[in-house]
């Protein structure tokens, strides 16, 4: 080779290298933008989080209208009944709803898709009805805790409300499984918005004193009708029309999943409901006021990673081979969405707490910092549980969730008398960190392991 050709070769190599660098640099800079614009996982995640935000805003307006238009005893009694209704729905429908994320993406035909969805709705509705009857019997008649449920009208409204809400949750998860979580957003926005005018027209059901329960039940029923008529066909060409033929076989096929998915969801959320009660028992009612206000602000962290993990569950259940890439996208999504709320709570948490009163920053500031820091290990735990659920390792997911729950509750119980509400933050971050470390140690097995 001559010197001249060597020189031309070197120059050409430099030009190609420069062109390659220019080509690689823009793709690296635009990778996140391109992925965010086209990622179904992100769309589902944002729609799920938006559902929580929108329903919370309409809920705030609803209770503001109730407070302005009714005596305090009406608001208090109605809030108690609604809390019982929501608890009944959660403990009876979450298993069937989660099972939809597992089974619908795996359906091979439209008939199979409809049969599985029908099975989930039947299980959730039956559970809601039985749970409603139990609450009416125990809290309405046996103990008299909820007097509104003693009347036949109140009892029927409560049971119907439990059925409507339970079926609605299953349809919401069917929308998530079909990458249409925006339909979940629309249905829930309609349901919560419709309660506001409905609560102002008590003559809808003459003789009914509990306007709040009436508004909730009627709005839930209306939103179901909209979901049934407005849901476009699924990827397999199916609508939401129930299919009873082959239903017993579908129930037998899904029975273990329905039960275990229920337990996984309950163990994953139970701590949120038990910890405030624990603060009351171990410290005081006053301490719980500071704790609950701080817990509500920190709830933003318990909204982001669960929403993304739910979308991850649906994505991986339909395509198990894409677990690795889906996990990476989920981690990036959560990291991006957590940055702003974490910074706000770490550096402006005192200002947020001061909105509740001058003494709240001093009592809850440290707890809020701990909750903010716990968002990272909590996200790792939620992603791992979603992968285990999607790949049919349900027992592993159940034991994992149970271990984290028990650790947070036991540590809180032991530390609360000595440390006050800060103990809950320490217990929470310790339990989540322990779970996250376990995930990091066994990450390869979690992502690539075979179904149990």
Image: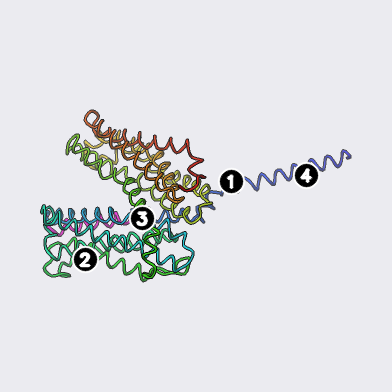
Q: CA distance from mark 2 to mark 1?
A: 52 Å
Q: Which residue is mark 3?
A: 258
The magenta-colored residue range is 54-71
Numbered disc 4: secondary structure: helix
**Mark 3: few/some/many CA within 10 Å (<14, 14-19, 20+):** many
Numbered disc 3: secondary structure: helix
- Residue 115 against residue 323 in the figure, above or below: below
Quadrant in the rendering for residue 121:
bottom left
Q: CA distance from mark 3 to mark 4?
A: 63 Å
- Depth check, mark 1 against mark 3: the one in front is 3
Instruction: Evaluate if marks 3 and 4 touch, with contact meaning CB atoms under 8 Å apart.
Output: no
For marks 4 and 2 on the same chain, the one whose residue lies earlier in the sequence: 4
Give residue 265's position: percent from left, percent from top.
34, 49
Instruction: Evaluate if marks 1 and 3 touch, with contact meaning CB atoms under 8 Å apart.
Output: no
Residue 402 lies within the magenta run: no
**Mark 2: few/some/many CA within 10 Å (<14, 14-19, 20+):** some
Instruction: Evaluate if marks 3 and 2 touch, with contact meaning CB atoms under 8 Å apart.
Output: no
- Depth check, mark 4 against mark 2: the one in front is 2
Q: CA distance from mark 1 to mark 4?
A: 24 Å
For marks 2 and 1 on the same chain, the one whose residue lies earlier in the sequence: 1
- Depth check, mark 3 against mark 2: the one in front is 3
Q: CA distance from mark 3 to mark 2?
A: 34 Å
Res 196 seen here: no
Q: Which residue is mark 1?
A: 28
Q: Quarter of the image containing the N terminus?
A: top right
């Amino acid at each position: 080779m001559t010197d001249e050709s060597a020189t031309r070769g070197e120059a050409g190599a430099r030009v190609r290298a420069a062109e390659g660098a220019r080509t690689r640099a823009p793709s690296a800079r635009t990778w996140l933008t391109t992925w965010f614009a086209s990622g179904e996982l992100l769309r589902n995640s944002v729609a799920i989080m938006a559902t929580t935000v929108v329903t919370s805003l309409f809920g705030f307006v609803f209770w503001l209208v109730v407070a302005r238009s009714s005596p305090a005893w009406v608001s208090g009694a109605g809030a108690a009944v609604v809390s019982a209704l929501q608890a009944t729905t959660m403990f009876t429908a979450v298993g069937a709803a989660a099972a939809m994320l597992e089974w619908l993406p795996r359906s091979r035909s439209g008939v199979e898709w409809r049969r599985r969805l029908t099975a989930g709705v039947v299980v959730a509705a039956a559970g809601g009805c039985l749970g409603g009857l139990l609450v009416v019997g125990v809290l309405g008649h046996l103990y008299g805790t909820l007097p509104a449920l003693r009347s036949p009208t109140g009892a029927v409204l409560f049971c119907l409300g439990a059925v409507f809400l339970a079926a609605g949750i299953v349809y919401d998860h069917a929308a998530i499984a079909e990458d249409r979580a925006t339909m979940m957003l629309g249905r829930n926005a309609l349901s919560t918005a419709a309660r506001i005018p409905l609560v102002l027209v008590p003559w809808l059901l003459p003789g009914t004193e509990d306007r709040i329960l009436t508004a909730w039940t009627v709005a839930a029923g209306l939103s179901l009708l909209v979901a049934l008529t407005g849901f476009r066909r699924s990827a397999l060409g199916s609508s939401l029309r129930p299919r009873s033929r082959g239903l017993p076989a579908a129930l037998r096929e899904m029975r273990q999943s329905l039960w275990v998915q229920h337990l996984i969801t309950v163990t994953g959320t139970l701590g949120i409901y038990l910890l405030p009660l624990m603060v009351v028992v171990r410290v005081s009612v006053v301490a719980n006021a500071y704790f609950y206000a701080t817990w509500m602000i920190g709830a933003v962290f318990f909204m982001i990673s669960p929403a993304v993990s739910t979308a991850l569950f649906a994505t991986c259940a339909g395509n198990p081979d894409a677990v690795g890439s889906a996990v990476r996208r989920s981690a990036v999504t959560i990291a991006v969405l957590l940055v702003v709320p974490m910074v706000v709570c770490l550096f402006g948490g005192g200002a947020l707490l001061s909105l509740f009163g001058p003494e709240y920053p001093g009592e809850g500031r440290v707890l809020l910092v701990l909750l903010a820091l716990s968002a990272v290990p909590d996200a790792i735990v939620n992603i791992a549980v979603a992968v285990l659920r999607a790949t049919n390792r349900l027992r592993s997911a159940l034991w994992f969730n149970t271990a984290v729950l028990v650790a947070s509750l036991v540590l809180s119980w032991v530390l609360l008398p000595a440390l006050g509400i800060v103990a809950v933050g320490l217990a929470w971050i310790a339990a989540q960190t322990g779970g996250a470390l376990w995930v990091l140690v066994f990450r390869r097995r979690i992502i690539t392991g075979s179904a149990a």
